[in-house]
Image (tube, rainbow, N blue to C red):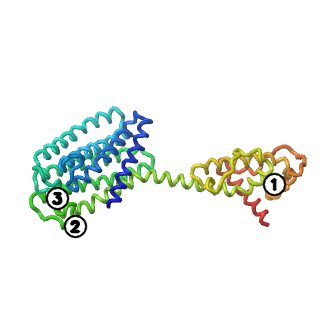
């Protein structure tokens, strides 16, 4: 658990740093600014929540006040999450008006939390729902978080209508998760009321602090909150993951074609080394690197085409025996013979496009390799 908590803390700080760097490049991006503020709130709330859960002071601040500050930044962060979708989906002026209106329920919720903490007797455990002010505190926080998640889910669905397919699916998955979190937060409120009214508490091993949550609250977290969080994260990650998967497929296609063109390129490069676009030898490790594969793939295609143009005057045919004729042409060029004709088209595909051109070159390269094996 300690390792997970440390990983969460370090991860949130790293993500905040990346978001801040992106925001510095586009300071006028309100959607990105809202998302950066959200991560800042999460990063700040993390250590405060850990200390409050253990009923410990942090930087001289007592647990109850820590719990207040934690929820202030959490609720502000929820407002920033709503703002992110507002500024992403709506016109800037309309989004600003709606975002400013959202500060009214936020201000009311923060006022109730502050008054509840002021009225709570010193030394009260921060999750003791039998104390009225603590019950009010948690009920208010859960209700506002439910409101924020529901509003975010609605805006995610609206944004999905005009988003590209991958992003739209991710937004819809996230909205389902957000509605699940909303339902969980709504379940927590009656659970808190049951506990405040003296209802049965969950067994100690099921509750966060020994006996502060009702069985209803526990099962609400288990069957609504946790799947909701999982779906929300899956929806957020899905578009980027699909983009990375598509990029990986393109990378693998280029790497495979780069390798398959090797026999043809080797023969042509031996005759026309001056056509090489790069004079730097490529190691096996660099050959497999994600960043350089595309560059070397395009270079190899261009170098193969340039070499075929140079050797084409020596060819006696351009049909089924192209590989054999190409080898004879390479021998004639190496021996210093003069070409009989001008440059002619070689291995021209029937379809237009780079992929068709590369496929034709790969076919020629395979035929050339087969002759070498024979």
Question: Where is the N terminus found, in terms of image quarters?
Answer: bottom left
Determine the image quadrant of residue 323.
Answer: bottom right
Question: Where is the C terminus found, in terms of image quarters?
Answer: bottom right
Q: Which mark is drawn over residue 205? A: 2
In the picture provided, is 220 more to the left or to the right than 330? left
Element assignment for label 2: helix
Mark 3 or mark 1, earlier in chain? 3
Q: Position of residue 34 (x, y in %)?
A: 34, 40
Observer-nearest of 355 and 82: 82
**Residue at coordinates 37% horizontally, 40% vertically from top-left?**
89
Q: Classify 332 as above or below 114.
A: below
Q: Quick one: which residue is furthest to the front in this view? A: 60
Observer-nearest of 207 and 187: 207
The residue where tag 3 is placed is 191
Work out how far the residue at label 2 is from the one at label 3, CA to CA, in angstroms. 17 Å
Observer-nearest of 54 and 140: 54
Element assignment for label 1: helix
Nearer the camera: disc 2 or disc 1 = 2
Q: Which mark is drawn over residue 18? A: none
Element assignment for label 3: helix
Mark 2 or mark 1, earlier in chain? 2
Q: Quick one: which residue is furthest to the top in this view? A: 93
Q: Classify 366 as above or below 34.
A: below
**Residue at coordinates 77% horizontally, 59% vertically from top-left?**
368
Work out how far the residue at label 3 is from the one at label 1, CA to CA, in angstroms. 81 Å
Observer-nearest of 232 and 265: 265
Nearer the camera: disc 3 or disc 1 = 3
Mark 2 or mark 3, earlier in chain? 3
The residue where tag 1 is placed is 326
Q: How many C-alpha atoms fall within 10 Å of the one at disc 2: few (<14), some, or many (≥20)?
A: few
């Amino acid at each position: 658990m300690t390792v997970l908590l440390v990983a969460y803390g370090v991860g949130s700080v790293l993500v905040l740093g990346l978001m801040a760097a992106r925001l510095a490049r586009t300071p006028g991006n309100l959607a990105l600014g809202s998302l950066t503020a959200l991560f800042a709130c999460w990063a700040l709330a993390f250590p405060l929540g850990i200390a409050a859960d253990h009923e410990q002071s942090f930087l001289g601040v007592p647990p109850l006040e820590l719990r207040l500050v934690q929820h202030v930044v959490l609720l502000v962060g929820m407002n920033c999450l709503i703002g992110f979708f507002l500024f992403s989906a709506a016109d800037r002026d309309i989004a600003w008006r709606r975002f400013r209106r959202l500060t009214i329920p936020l201000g009311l919720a923060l006022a109730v939390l502050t008054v509840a903490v002021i009225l709570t007797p010193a030394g009260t455990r921060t999750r003791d729902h039998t104390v009225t002010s603590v019950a009010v505190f948690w009920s208010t926080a859960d209700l506002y978080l439910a409101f924020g998640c529901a509003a975010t889910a609605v805006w995610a669905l609206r944004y999905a209508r005009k988003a590209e397919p991958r992003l739209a699916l991710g937004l819809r998955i996230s909205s389902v998760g957000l509605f699940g979190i909303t339902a969980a937060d709504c379940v927590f409120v009656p659970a808190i009321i049951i506990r405040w009214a003296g209802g049965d508490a969950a067994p100690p091993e099921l509750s966060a602090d020994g006996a502060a949550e009702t069985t209803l609250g526990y099962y609400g977290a288990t069957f609504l909150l946790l799947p909701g969080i999982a779906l929300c994260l899956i929806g957020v990650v899905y578009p980027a993951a699909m983009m990375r998967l598509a990029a990986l497929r393109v990378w693998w296609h280029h790497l495979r074609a780069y390798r398959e063109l090797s026999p043809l390129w080797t023969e042509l490069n031996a005759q026309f080394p001056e056509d090489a676009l790069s004079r730097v030898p490529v190691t096996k490790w660099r050959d497999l690197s994600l960043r350089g594969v595309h560059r070397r793939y395009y270079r190899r295609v261009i170098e193969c085409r340039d070499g075929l143009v140079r050797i084409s005057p020596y060819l006696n045919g351009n049909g089924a025996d192209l590989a054999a004729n190409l080898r004879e042409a390479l021998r004639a060029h190496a021996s210093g013979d003069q070409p009989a004709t001008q440059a002619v088209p070689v291995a021209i595909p029937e379809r237009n496009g780079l992929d068709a051109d590369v496929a034709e070159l790969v076919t020629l390269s395979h035929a050339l390799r087969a002759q070498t094996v024979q």
